[in-house]
Image (cartoon, helix red, strand yellow):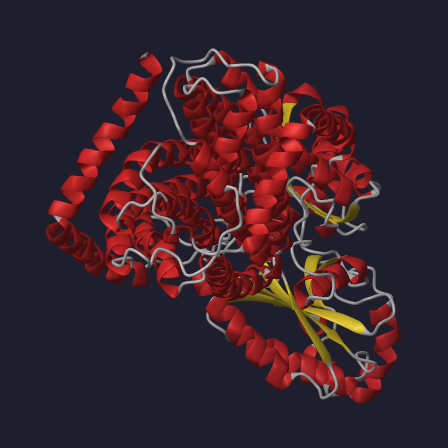
Amino acid sequence: MRTVITQFSRREPYLKLHDQIVRHRRPILMAIGTLLIVAFPLLLKMEFDMSFRPLFAEQDRLHEATTEFEKVLGQPSGAYIGVVLESDSILTPAFLAALSSVSDNVASLDHVIEVVSLTNFHYPIWTDRGISVVPLIPAAILNDHKTLAKSLKKIRSHPKVRRVILSEDGQKTLLLARLGLPLSDLKERRKVIKQFRTAVSTGAPPGTELRFTGVSVVEDAYADLVLKNLLKSISLTLVFLIIALYLFFRRIADVVIALAGISIATPITIAIMHLLGQKITIVNSMVPTMILIIGVADAIHMQQSCLQHRAQGLNIHEAVRNMFGDMGFPCLMTTVTTIIGFMSLGMANIRAIRDFGLNVSIGVLTIYLMNLVFIPLLLRLFHKQNNDCTAGSASWIDGLVQGSTYVVIRYPGRIVTVSALMIVGCLSTLPYLSLDQKFNEEVRPEHPVRFNQALLEREFSGFLGPEISVQRKDRSTLLNEDRIARIRSFQQEIADHPDVIRVRSLVDYLPKAMPKDKARDTLLKLRNTPALRHQLRELISEDGSRAGILVRTGDMGTERAQLFKTWLAQAAAGHFGQAYEVEMVGQWWLAQSGMINILHDMLWSFGTACLMILPIMALLLRSVRLFLVSLLPNILPLVAALGFMAATGISVRIGTAMILAIALGIAIDDTIHFMIRLHKETTLMKAPEHCVRRAISHVGRAIIYTSVVLILGFISMISNDLIAIRDMGIVAAVTVGVALFSDVYLAPALFLLALGTSRTPRLGVQHMENGDDFLSRLTQRIPSPCRVRRPNTD
């Protein structure tokens, strides 16, 4: 009796809520309209932050160490924007004259504080008069072609420029512009990048290939990609949803009903993001698409429930009211579990991921509230006629529902066995799962951003890599013979590492002929030399107590970055001992650390989601047996997602790393609808096979609808140019597909095996029910169930 009372108590508040919404629909709609009027101006004010900074680690110690280092020595990471000039005539007087003119034009740009090129390159030498800074190519010989021609061979082999600003083959040269702007200020940097491109493009000699690169140049390109793909993704998702919904419902009106909630909720959610002080980031750009994909699921369940009540002979008003009473609570539970899945991302150390989870959660809750208001009202508006509940049906889905019911009842043991083998197979692939993220592998290999960076690493020194902070614990000077020797030997060991392209430290500015006791005075003097001051100030502090070592590597990825950090710590201990503090700092290391922490964060998020969702399932079903039956169908999609990633080489990184927590929140939604219906059927004291037939006949079609819509929505993400988002869509689509199998086949098969076939389940009290004729009618392929007029026997 308790089960029947519980079901009534869940239904009754929603029936009252429905009556209140219908009675007060005008003020409610006016309030929502006012909310939209307020939301649209806020939506237009939404700002973009397409830099990589939101993805950086935010641990206090690591962030503080980098901030402290940059406060003293500046921000070497991303200081330069650059261009590779490729030509057969680089080492000719004509080309160098043009390069000199381009360098001067770049130097005149706002916020450019230093230019480095073949014609604007200086280095120190030691003479009898002390330290001097000389140009690689003196201005006096630039117009003296004869003298310049004699110097070109020497320039090509000069160790200071070879593989620094001139390639080994002499056919590529690098022009660098140091910006006096912080790396985080991408908005202002984008303006300078645009001017830089114009100045170089207009002044470069004809026939010169230009390849622009640098951290900010890459961020600038990614910003354009994200914005373009955001618009494309939303458009494709809407198109896919509209097509799928029309094929399911065969009525434009029903498509409008299904999309009403998300159409209202999306601008409201983005407006709330603005009020929370958030910006559209690389991760947040997925929020509108995610809301569109997820938000339509409950609307489909509500519409299908209404159609089933119409098929029993109820008029539209009675059908809508009964639908509201039946679906209000299950949709609330799916909303809660989805929100928990996304809110669990709040465990992440990366703020961008935390914001993403919060924003989608707000969107899902808003959609639930909008569906409660608009779906009943629109159903009443568009389905006024008794014979106007549906214009047709997708017969293949009817066949799939009937076929699934037959297979489940006939072969439950085989289904469970196949599922168990799938889980074992997926678990066996987990050792091959890649936990790697590379800076430059988020676009296709031929994309200019990726190609240019690879060229820069291959021919020059690249722009990726950490800074190393060196200081004594007593904060005494480093500028004596012993301590400089330690830095020199440490630098040499780093340079010998196979992942390192180039290392730069203060010892590179000490000429070999210089007396060792002159090092301190020489370096402090060079710090104030106009041609070298910016380069020296990022290598040694004004008082000489802190040194920076700049390491440039290839795009090694997070796995090797972690190993490289461990190796550096061991090497530093061997060269400096306990009296020194040596640590890896810089923007590159913040980025790598943020990506390294993703796996840890996602495991915590997944664990949190499980701890919160599973008790809800237990309280919802109020049956240990049904709760245990529901576990495996929700485990299989998660394991399958990881197994698929391992088998296809998709690594765990930004995007795909979030899939565990997200998948649990999404995959469990249809399970909740099925298990609640199955729980209701068990109260009727029918055989297990009968309960399964009834449950699948009532919710099977809606589960298939929502799963196909989700899959199509996630598949639309494949068109994204960013590989992380594309992979996220692929993995999510596979997860939803496996979840569909789990809900339609595995869950009922486990139920049958748990209770035993052809036995009456003892999960509730006897409840008279004469629905056999209705059941047989529901499981038949009929073009329009509303043509049948029968009393309500449910």
Using the image, determine if residue 175 lies above or below residue 492: below
Q: Is residue 571 visible?
A: no
Q: Please tell me which residue lies in front, 158 or 337.
A: 337
Where does the image place residue 107, in percent across and percent down from the top left?
55, 73
User: Quadrant where the N terminus lies?
Assistant: top left
Where does the image place residue 790, in percent across and percent down from the top left?
34, 42
Where does the image place residue 47, in percent across and percent down from the top left?
37, 58
Q: Seen in the image, is 490 located left or right of residue 741?
A: right
Q: Seen in the image, is 327 located left or right of residue 113?
A: left
Q: Seen in the image, is 138 located left or right of residue 158?
A: left
User: Quadrant where the C terminus lies?
Assistant: top left
Determine the residue positioned at 33% across, 59% down: 388
Determine the residue positioned at 28% across, 35% down: 325
Q: Is residue 475 visible?
A: yes
Q: Please tell me which residue lies in front, 57 or 71.
A: 57
Q: Please tell me which residue lies in front, 529 or 452.
A: 452
Determine the residue positioned at 67% across, 44% down: 437
